[in-house]
Amino acid sequence: MIKPPIVQPTDEVTTVGKVFTTPLVVKGKSWFPIAQVLAWPIMAWVAKKRRPERSWLQSLGVGALTMPVVLGSEWGHNLAHAAAAHIVGKPMDAIRVIGGMPLLVYYDINDETVTPRQHIMRSLGGPVFNILVLPIALLFRQRTDPDSVGRDIANTAVATNAFLPAVGLLPIPGIDGGPILKWSLVEKGHTQPEADLTVRKVDGVLGALLLAAGIVFLKKRRWFIGGLLLQLAAYALSIALGFLREQE
């Protein structure tokens, strides 16, 4: 995956449990739940924006309920990857908790003992989880009062579980869609270098489209989605131009 080294085989870590057969580890104090601390006021701000008549104390209460929905969906996404890896018999090397959130660890993303189909199945675990949760969240939203706290929770569940697979399945290395595309090509007979080159070409086109879409949304003052699209565009274009690589 394209990210700073999460944990190396020689690092000193503390195993706090196992997810299926995968060690759940922490390293030093980096496990401290910064994500939860930051997400709570953000979700309170969202609750206040949705219903300005709420007091900030009430909004903080709503945020305390919606924050676990957002972060819990991400936890579920990653644990589903672990489940898929366990099912295909090729578990990941570790799950490290950083900032209160799980990050998946593969020491060798091109492990030759893992078949292309197994790579694909491992990558599909997270998106499949969110896609299965989404209709449940939609049904919950239908059954809640529009002005209720339950609607806030339902809206959050719908948005999060739609967002995660929508972004995750983009064919960018480092997220789920990149490995799915790469190993699908290998399964069809391409070599790994050929598959990597094809992914880079796809990301060049994708990056240009994301860049254009981001600019459009920024012009419409949709700052969050516009900024997100520009970040994804920069990521995809960095892959296409060779500035970022999956694994040296």
Image (cartoon, rainbow, N blue to C red):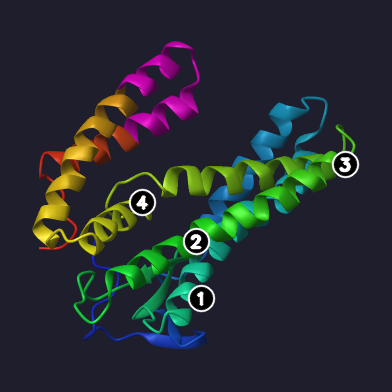
Q: Is residue 145 left or right of residue 71?
A: right
* Disc on the earlier residue, 2 or 1: 1
The tag earlier along the polypeptide, 2 or 4, is 2
Magenta stretch?
212-231
Q: Nearer the viewer, mark 3 or mark 4?
A: 4
State how far apart marks 4 and 1 are (Cα): 18 Å
Residue bearing mark 1: 83
Q: Is residue 178 left or right of residue 125?
A: left
Q: Residue furthest top?
A: 219
Quadrant that contains the C terminus: bottom left
Q: As shown in the figure, which amino acid type bears the numbered disc 2?
A: Gly
**Amino acid type, callout 3:** Thr
Quarter of the image where one finds residue 147: top right
**SS at mark 4 in the image:** helix
Amino acid at dot 1: Ala
Q: Are marks 4 and 1 in contact (CB under 8 Å)?
A: no
Q: Earlier in the sequence, mark 3 or mark 4?
A: 3
